[in-house]
Structure formats: C-alpha cells, structure tokens
C-alpha cells in the first residue's frame, strides 16, 4: 500500500472526466461521482466532529462509521462491487436503539444547534441526507446494492439521535423549534 499513492496528480481529469475504480471514465458531474463526493464530504464532517470532546463510546462508533463510509465510497467507485455488509446496518440499528432509549421523547421539532459537536453532527446529518438523495437518483439509473441504500438511511437517523446525545452529554439543551416565534 505504500506505493499506492506515489503520484497524486495524473492530468487525466483536466478535460472534465474522472476514472472509476473499474477503469471506466465518466464526467465529473456524473451522479456516481456526485454520490462519491457526498459520501466523502460526510466522512470529512464526521472527522470534524471527532475534533470535539465526545465520549469514548461515541468516538469509537464514529470511527467505525468513517471506515464504513470509506467502504461505501469504494463501492460507489467500482460499479457492481459490494463492500458494505448487512451486519453494519444491523449494528447501526442497535446503537440507534440504545442511544434513543436514553433520550426523552420528542415533543417539538429540533433546530440544528446546541453544543458545537451537536452542530457539526447536524451538518453531518444534512450531508448524509444529500448523499442518500444522490444515491437514490443514481440507483434509478444504475442499480446500487440494497444494503448501501439501507446503510445511508440508517446513518442519517443515527446522526439525528446522536445530535441529541451530544447535547445531552454536553449538558446543553436541544434547540427546540417554536412556531409561535414573532417574525415581525
């Protein structure tokens, strides 16, 4: 692996195309490339979240998720290749259920904010939702794995719950939407 990235620039993308993992070239605005970019951006936002003081258990889960997202990016880069495993969807569901049990039931909508880590998590959640939309658009043209689509959907749910967990751990209340706010 040490020689894998020995040369960063290749000049092959100068005319608006990029190479996929299987050797085919597509335009840089191809839905597959957009999906790869959205997943990469999501992984980067999670990396920003990890610069904040979060519990060791949250950190461990986010590190696993980062590896999952790298696998998902690899899957998107290589049409027909499968890297995301159904066990990872089940793992997200387990942690989602466990985290959600420790939270008070929602009675209002939540606005992005609270602690800095939660605000970054809300950003990750919105990028995840965009990645999911892009993946579904791509899936309408080129079939993706059902597991990958399930994974990205569960992850957006998990990130929403994690926003609340991060605020709870920081001792900061969630920012509740108030539809009676005076707007005049």
Image (spheres, rainbow, N blue to C red):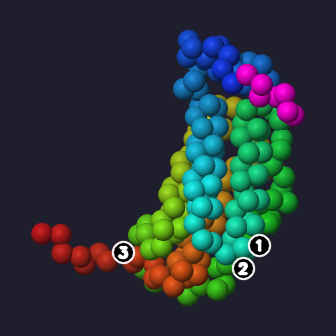
Q: Say which mark, if any, is on residue 76.
A: none
Q: Position of residue 147 (x, y in %)?
A: 77, 51
Mark 2 and mark 1 in contact (Cβ < 8 Å)?
yes
Q: Earlier in the sequence, mark 2 or mark 3?
A: 2
Q: Earlier in the sequence, mark 1 or mark 3?
A: 1
Could you tell me how far apart the alpha carbons at marks 1 and 3 are, in whole angstroms?
28 Å
Q: Residue at x 57, y 14 (%)?
A: 14
- Placement of 71 over or under 126, stated as above or below: above
Badge 2 marks a residue whose secondary structure is helix
- Placement of 166 over or under 74, stated as above or below: below
Identify the residue position indicated by label 3 in the image.
177
State left or right for residue 23 relative to residue 114.
right
Badge 3 marks a residue whose secondary structure is loop
Q: Say which mark, if any, is on residue 94.
A: 1
> Label 1: how many residues lie within 10 Å, few (<14), some (14-19) or many (20+)?
few
Q: Residue at x 72, y 79 (%)?
A: 98
Identify the residue position indicated by label 2 in the image.
98
Q: Classify residue 26 by image quadrant.
A: top right
Q: Position of residue 181 (x, y in %)?
A: 23, 76
The quadrant in which the C terminus is found is bottom left
Magenta stretch encompasses residue 6: yes
Residue found at the far left of this picture: 184
| Segment colored magenta | 1-7
Residue 173 appears in view: yes
Could you tell me how far apart the alpha carbons at marks 1 and 2 are, in whole angstroms?
6 Å
């Amino acid at each position: 692996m040490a020689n894998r990235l020995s040369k960063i620039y290749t000049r092959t993308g100068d005319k608006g195309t990029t190479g996929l993992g299987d050797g085919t070239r597509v335009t840089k605005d191809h839905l597959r490339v957009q999906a790869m970019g959205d997943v990469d951006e999501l992984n980067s936002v999670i990396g920003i979240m990890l610069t904040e003081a979060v519990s060791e258990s949250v950190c461990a889960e986010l590190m696993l998720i980062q590896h999952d997202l790298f696998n998902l990016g690899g899957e998107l880069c290589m049409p027909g290749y499968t890297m995301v495993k159904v066990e990872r969807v089940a793992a997200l569901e387990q942690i989602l259920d466990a985290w959600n049990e420790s939270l008070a039931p929602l009675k209002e909508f939540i606005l992005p904010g609270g602690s800095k880590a939660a605000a970054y998590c809300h950003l990750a959640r919105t990028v995840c939702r965009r990645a999911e939309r892009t993946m579904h658009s791509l899936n309408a043209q080129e079939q993706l794995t059902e597991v990958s689509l399930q994974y990205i959907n569960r992850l957006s749910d998990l990130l929403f719950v994690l926003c609340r967990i991060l605020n709870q751990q920081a001792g900061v209340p969630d920012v509740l939407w108030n539809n009676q706010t005076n707007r005049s």
